[in-house]
Image: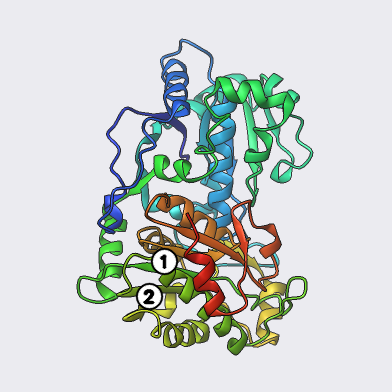
Amino acid sequence: MRLLTCVLATAAAWDSLEWLGGGFRGPSCADKRWVALFNETQTRMLAGVIGPRFVVVTPHSKAGLGNRLRAVRAGLALAALTKRCLVLDYSSLDPENRGRRAGESRWLDGTELDVLAPNLVRWDAARTLYEATAKVRGRDAWTLPMNGKGLDGGKLLAYNGLAMVVAAWNHDPTAKLLRAPAVRSAAAAAGLADDDGASRGCALRALFAPTPALAAALAAARASLGPGATLDAAVHLRTNIEYDRGWGRMTCRDVGCWTDVAAVFSRCARALARTATTLLVAADDDGLVDAARARARADFGAAVALPGRVRHHSGISRAEKQLALEASQSHVLGHGDVLGPLLDMLLIASADAFVGTAGSSFSEQARDWGGFGGDRKAVLFTTPYVKSYQGDADSAPLPATPAEAELACRKVT
């Protein structure tokens, strides 16, 4: 069993995301007040000065990489708010536990925690603390409501049991939670009131650095895009392949329609980027990637993409009835391990500008991990994607034409 436990923020120097290979220096999370306070709490806990308490995150087996990372960043925010250690418990996904369950198809041989190492936050610092404490005290735990729905902030702060469990979440409700009246003063005391870093980009950027294997894979992926490729911009199009319906009045049921959306994304990316040499195209359909690259050549010198094998659902498992439905509709998303989608996400994060899909957890995590801001601009558009209505406050309506997109995106600050 592999139990990845207690997050300990350290004073290590911020690495500016240079390991992504983008040639830029991102804004630092090291000076965030919540990081310093979190570090103090964890240090005292590990030293036995105060009793250990935990927030335990267990993954949603059918959720993809983006949704799993939503849960991880939610767990970190809750741990910082309630002065607890963070436990990333992927033990149910260890090889000996990856057997086939009734009604499920499993295929992953690894998860993101197999290729990511601690960075500014050392989540490996007290690997055995949670298990050792649980053996003595018993598993005194409160499983929080799914995605925090109806979560009582006062009860959250008052709970003094060993562990709060974030089980199978695929959304992060903590930005709203931190503004709730019952939580506001505690959020301010934890350094979270005026900074969403624990529930947005600083969570991923503080938690994770590459293992040597991931660094090598990322370098190889970048090299495959072309000699010395520097990504001036990236786009990510999340489609409705497995839903076959649209959102509101917008509907896209064929590649031609989505290619028109891609043309809007490309022109916006050109307006956001400082130069227009290379655009990275990421999507969940090979045909759309090819069509989008062809259209994007009107805006960029080259439009590149990783091989099609990265375009698969990155869930740990899928229900067999869902796979059968997709096959009956001639929509086969494909299956594989998490590395391909993670490489696509990290390459997007390294780009100079980014245009993504509102409501897509993959687009959200790529944007937040990259720390876009200042001269590096990003936009998430609401599109015909069926979950686009779930986009955050930074989402923008999709312009009707590439020309309108260029005008709108030149105004992005």
Q: What is the number of the mark on residue 15?
A: none
Q: Is residue 293 above or below residue 281?
A: below
Q: Residue at x 39, y 72 (%)?
A: 280
Q: Position of residue 358 (x, y in %)?
A: 61, 62
Q: Position of residue 196 (x, y in %)?
A: 54, 38
Dot 1: element: helix
Residue, x 48% and y 83% (percent of image)?
292
User: As shown in the figure, which amino acid type bears the numbered disc 1?
Assistant: Asp
Q: Position of residue 77 (x, y in %)?
A: 56, 35
Q: Amino acid at mark 2?
A: Leu
Seen from the viewer's position, the closer of residues 399 and 227 is 399
- Most extreme residue toward the left, as rendered? 227
Badge 2 local density, few (<14 within 10 Å), some, or many (20+)?
A: many
Sequence-wise first label, 2 or 1? 2
Instruction: Judge whether 119 appears above or below 332 on screen.
Output: above
The residue labelled by disc 2 is 306
Q: Residue at label 1?
A: 344
Residue 108 located left or right of residue 47: right
Label 2 close to label 1 by CB (< 8 Å) = yes
